[in-house]
Amino acid sequence: MILVEHAAILLIAFPLLGAFITPIVGRVNSLFRDTWVITVLAFTELLAVLLGYDVLQNGISVYTLGARLPALTSPSGIPVRIILEVDAMNAFISVIVSSIALVVVWYCLGFMNQSRVLDKLYTLILLLLTGMLGLTLTGDLFNLFVFLEVVSISSAALIAFYVHRGESLEAAFKYMVLSSIGALMVLFAVALIYGQYNLLSMAAVADKIQNTFLDEVAMVLLISAFLLKAGSVPAHMWKPDAYGEAPAPVAVLLLTSALVCLYVLFRIIFTVFNPATPLLGWVLAILGVSSIFLGVSMALIQNNLSRLIAYSAIAEIGFILLGTGSGLIEAPYLSMVGFNAISGGVFHILNDVLDLGLLFLAAGAVFYLTGERDLNRMGGLGHTQPLLAVFFLVGIFAVSGLPPFNGFASKMMIYESVYVFNPLLAIIGILGSILMLAVFVKVFFSIFLGVSPAKGHGKLPKSMLAGMGVLVLLIILIGLFPALVVDYLISPAVNALINSQNYIGGVL
Amino acid sequence: MLIDLPFLAVVVLLALGVYAVVFRHNLIKIVMGVHILGSGVNLFLISLGYREGGVAPIFTHAPKLEMVLPTPQALTLTSIVINLAVVALMLSLIMLIYKRYKSLDSRDRRLMG
């Protein structure tokens, strides 16, 4: 079917086209514009699902831009074209990204109904989606840099959405400086690799790589750049500012882009610079544990709801790094335990975006009702908004890994396998989880219980409730049937990730 | 010997850029630092593709000589455009920050995360 054949490029092209048509459509009227944006997102989602299904059935799909084969017209047979390479891992990430974008925009319909600049908001959201999908699907190192900059620029503009607030502008500026330096590090690393091998395609580089000193410099630059964009510990300081100041739906998209950057990090470690050394595994695991520790302990002392959730997002990134890092330690990822550790990390990417996404959206709903960011001045919301309170409670339990919800499934996989490698790391992880529950229980009490300030609360629009409801439903379903998800989605993805020969063989 | 000169310039540019971003407190100087860093990386890319005595990589009617590599030039062109967009966005953010606070010093900020 022609749609499936070109799904990879359409996934990038369609939101891009949709982004630039949105302001034109917005001139007509707002209902037409909303329908248009939702249609674009639904079609993108459909493409992602089709592509994912195709990849699971028929194996890796390679899309070559401008030619039928990557190596066409190249005398020495090396791939010279720009390629998009999709295996089970990127297909999985692209489905997550496009679904979250759909949910977030659906939520935005209600949340932003007072705003008069919605055309621009939707344009930027679609551009951010384009960047994230491009980052996920591309098989070319230079395109990685281009899409990283698309993500940075559109997210910075989105963080500064409340331009009347000086803090938002500062957060956006900080984010922009850090992420452009990160992107320049990526470009420098790409130059180092190109200077040695005259190649830009990731699969071909992975095939030729010699692990010279310059390669190691390039690897360190790439890893630090993507850890910076993901917001792991030594470079986490932009995160609470950006997440705290951006509107809640935008914070969810920023979280998604951080997870996409983590995926790119894994792709670089597992595929391009294969074989990865145990030392790298230790570095990732230690960074993960310190992110958990710092994220949770800083969350304890926050008074601003969004900043608090942002600090727990740092901790959650730590869990993903801990799982994958310990999978890389000692005789890596061929043993069942290592495989489980990496699966736990990859599974947690999905759970992280659902749990924290729900919490951010609920925080946005609280802000919508009360206009308040400070936890000390809230209270009693549970009397008027029982449904919101239940949603928030589900998010809390899921994010701190309590049994009937999805966070438990992935965290359990991580703890089990990390404990075999190093009990101390696993214990710190578990303690972090428990502390996170304590933090969030305090938050729940101060928002939803107690006496409410004498202010009339309005009603939540249906679209906001629907957006959160979808996430709650997914959290409960994944929590009840984790084995199905692991068997049908996670295991193929992890297999695709660690068997780099398949990825290389797809192109050469 | 002459070949190494561009790489020395790259090192100088990168050092200048990092210095400006890390040690300067004026927001506009930070942006200048980011741009200088970008120029350093661009120069690095372009000098990687240089071949001594090479001709411009245009195949039509080209003499049978060694060519400089075309790909780094394409990459640099793209990266220059991206850098322009980044700097433009950062400067517009600075404009709004100045309107709000009447100050360009990175030390009197309200966010300390």
Image (tube, coloured by chain):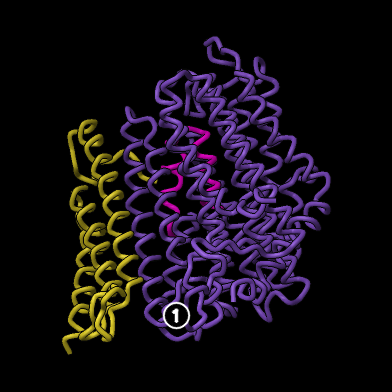
Return the residue at label 1.
A215
**Residue depicted at x 57% and y 21%:** A379
Q: Is residue A218 visible?
A: yes
| Chain letter matching colour purple | A
Q: Give the amino acid type for the residue marked by disc 1 in the picture.
A: Asp
Pointer 1: residues within 10 angstroms few (<14), some, or many (20+)?
some
**Nearer to me, B65 or A275:** B65
Q: Which residues are magenta?
A: A234-259
**Nearer to me, A133 or B31:** A133
* Position in image of residue A444 (x %, y %): 63, 31
**Residue A199 belongs to the span the image colors magenta:** no
* Position in image of residue A226 (x %, y %): 47, 61
- Is residue A229 depicted above or below A333 in this figure? above
SS class of the residue under badge 1? helix
- Is residue A272 depicted above or below A352 in this figure? below
Q: Main secondary structure of the magenta part?
A: helix
- Residue farthest along the bottom direction in this orientation: B1
In the displayed structure, does residue A200 sit left or right of residue A472? left
How many circles with numbers are drawn on the protein? 1
Residue A157: image quadrant is: top left
- Is residue A353 depicted above or below A317 in this figure? above
In the displayed structure, does residue A391 sit left or right of residue A375? right
**Residue depicted at x 41% and y 38%:** A158
**Residue A254 belongs to the span the image colors magenta:** yes
Chain ID for label 1? Answer: A
Quarter of the figure that contains the C terminus of chain A: bottom right
| Chain letter matching colour yellow | B
- Residue farthest along the front direction in this orientation: B61
